[in-house]
């Protein structure tokens, strides 16, 4: 844990009301694992920020010409103030006029193994270490040469002669971020996309390691080893002018979104909708955790299961469990609305705006706007998401207390009140064939083991559309489409707008009378 004064020089130089940089909330890595990051930083002058996780902070050096694998090169490095561990994933634009103003990318990231105690080695002026990054590999040394006239310590960064040494290797020939794949120019061109410290992130080096595996192999992700196969198999057919989505793409997405999605799944049984042969084939529900599942996977044994019913469910209590489910062929993720410690007490009330065959998208939007007005009138917090298919779903967070019967009755009363405003759009018939093509405001999902698709879950269709949370005012955006967000762009949306569904977790409430 960093001492308060370790980050004081860092904080004094920055106005955190203006810069998107993290203010220094402490964060930690897995026990025994030390991380490094190199950020390509175009400020007044181009330089590379070389940072090592040491004693609870990122010890940092500015390297003007960048690190190299060339054992003949001696790179000048200037020891600068320690940075917080939360800076590890920082990528974005520091505003002009702020300290270090300019664009920053995560040029390389990974882990390092120091020889001896790295904190003492830095104090003594000589640190030897092995780097395991996406671009930098092998034995490196940092050697202090002298203290400059300004008080800054001058060091040299060297690469030893080993099997990873490459003469003439130049950092400028490898310009892209290992976090986002973008160049500094692309970051500069999109300054609104700044790093969000309020979102949990997967380890960029672990995610990127998937691309080094062939068609099959072992992938270490979130501290777990997964055996992955058929990585180049197409799981989602292509949309026009796009490439199809492979299993490798899908697993990369699952790992990237897992830290954000896990809180919505934690402590809940997960119903998996599996498509092991891809979204172009018929899927099936798979709820029982298979006997061959690894022993580390969290699980719940339902004590009320009748003979022949699912007994043991996967519970995604950690991000690696979601990646395992994706690797198992679960293209859709459906959590229970109650938790395993109180399976008869829902924590969400669900509203499903289910379009009929003659329901237009404008009709769905009209129904959603009426619900928006109803929630405003009732003073109820609710969050909406497009389904990734044709409809919209609304989740209402509720405090533990009422059972499913009471919750379902409340949603039915709300839905019938809304439906009465536009009776020409809504049918209450149970059978779809009896609805005359009209929409159904489905309150029946409010029952034990009845689920709606999770936020950020893909849907089995061309282009890998995603059930994406939306702001209520986006219902007025003419560009909004129910399947308009895909696996390829929803992570960018998350970075730009944050987790729009977060109130579902943070604001449990009692349902008011209608």
Image (cartoon, rainbow, N blue to C red):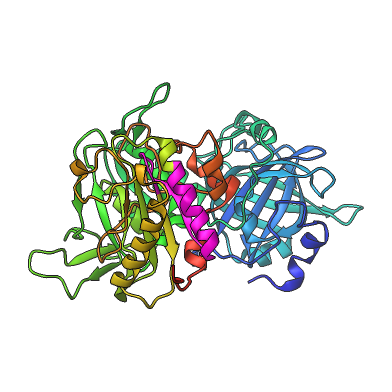
Expressed as whole percent of the image width and height from the top left, the position of residue 227 reads: 29, 49
- Whether 384 is among the magenta residues is yes
Q: Is residue 238 above or below residue 454?
A: above
Q: Quadrant of residue 396?
A: bottom left
Q: Is residue 493 left or right of residue 431?
A: right
Expressed as whole percent of the image width and height from the top left, the position of residue 455 reads: 41, 52
Residue drawn at the location 46% of the way across and 56% of the way down: 259
Which residue in the rendered view is the most extreme toward the left? 307
Q: Is residue 245 above or below residue 310?
A: above
The magenta segment is 365-392
The quadrant the N terminus occupies is bottom right
Please count the marks in the image.
0
Expressed as whole percent of the image width and height from the top left, the position of residue 302 reads: 20, 72
Expressed as whole percent of the image width and height from the top left, the position of residue 11 reads: 78, 62
Which residue in the rendered view is the most extreme toward the right? 149
Residue drawn at the location 18% of the way across and 41% of the way down: 433
Q: Is residue 341 above or below residue 449?
A: below
Which is nearer the eye, 455 or 2? 455
On the question of residue 92 being in view, the answer is yes
- Whether 312 is among the magenta residues is no
Q: Is residue 1 left or right of residue 468?
A: right
Which is nearer the eye, 306 or 148? 306
Which is nearer the eye, 413 or 212? 413
Which is nearer the eye, 494 or 200? 494
Residue drawn at the location 41% of the way across and 39% of the way down: 363
Which residue in the rendered view is the most extreme toward the top? 241
Q: Quadrant of residue 91?
A: top right
Q: Is residue 397 above or below residue 241?
A: below
The quadrant the C terminus occupies is bottom left
On the question of residue 486 being in view, the answer is no
């Amino acid at each position: 844990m960093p001492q308060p004064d370790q980050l004081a020089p860092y904080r004094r130089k920055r106005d955190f009301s203006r810069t998107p940089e993290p203010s220094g909330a402490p964060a930690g890595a897995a026990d025994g694992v030390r991380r490094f990051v190199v950020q390509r930083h175009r400020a007044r002058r181009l330089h590379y920020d070389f940072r090592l996780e040491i004693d609870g902070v990122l010890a940092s050096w500015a390297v003007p010409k960048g690190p190299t694998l060339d054992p003949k090169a001696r790179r000048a490095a200037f020891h600068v103030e320690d940075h917080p561990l939360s800076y590890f994933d920082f990528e974005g634009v520091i505003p002009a006029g702020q300290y270090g103003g300019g664009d920053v990318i995560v040029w390389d990231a990974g882990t390092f193994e120091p020889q001896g105690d790295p904190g003492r080695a830095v104090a003594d002026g000589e640190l030897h270490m092995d780097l395991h990054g996406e671009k930098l590999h092998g034995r490196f040394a940092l050697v202090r040469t002298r203290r400059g006239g300004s008080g800054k310590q001058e060091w040299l960064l060297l690469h030893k002669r080993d099997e990873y040494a490459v003469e003439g290797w130049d950092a400028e020939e490898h310009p892209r971020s290992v976090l986002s794949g973008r160049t500094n120019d692309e970051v500069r061109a999109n300054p609104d996309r700044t790093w969000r410290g309020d979102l949990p992130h997967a380890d960029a080096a672990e995610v990127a390691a998937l691309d080094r595996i062939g068609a099959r192999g072992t992938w270490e992700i979130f501290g777990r080893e997964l055996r992955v196969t058929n990585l180049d198999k197409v799981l989602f057919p292509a949309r026009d002018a796009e490439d199809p989505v492979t299993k490798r793409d899908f697993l990369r997405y699952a790992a990237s979104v897992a830290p954000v999605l896990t809180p919505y799944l934690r402590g809940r049984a997960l119903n998996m909708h599996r498509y092991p042969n891809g979204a172009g084939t018929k899927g099936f529900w798979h709820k029982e955790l298979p006997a061959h599942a690894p022993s580390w996977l969290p699980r719940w044994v339902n004590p009320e299961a009748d003979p022949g019913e699912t007994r043991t469910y996967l519970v995604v209590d950690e991000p690696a469990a979601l990646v395992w489910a994706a690797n198992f062929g679960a293209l859709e993720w459906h959590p229970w609305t109650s938790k395993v410690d109180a399976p008869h007490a829902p924590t969400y009330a669900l509203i499903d705006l289910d379009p009929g065959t003659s329901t237009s998208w404008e009709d769905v939007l009209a129904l959603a706007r009426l619900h928006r007005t109803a929630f405003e009138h009732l003073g109820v917090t609710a969050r909406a998401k497009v389904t990734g298919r044709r409809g919209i779903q609304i989740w209402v967070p509720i405090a533990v207390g009422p059972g499913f019967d009471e919750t379902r009755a409340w949603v039915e009363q709300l839905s019938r009140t809304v439906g009465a405003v536009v009776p020409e759009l809504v049918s209450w018939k149970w059978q779809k064939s009896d609805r005359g093509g009209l929409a159904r405001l489905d309150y029946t999902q409010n029952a034990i083991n009845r689920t709606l698709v999770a936020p950020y879950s893909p849907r089995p269709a061309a282009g890998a559309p995603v059930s994406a949370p939306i702001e209520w005012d986006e219902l007025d955006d003419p560009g909004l489409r129910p399947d308009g967000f895909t696996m390829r762009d929803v992570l960018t949306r998350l970075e730009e707008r944050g987790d729009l569904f977060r109130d579902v977790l943070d604001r449990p409430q009692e349902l008011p009378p209608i």
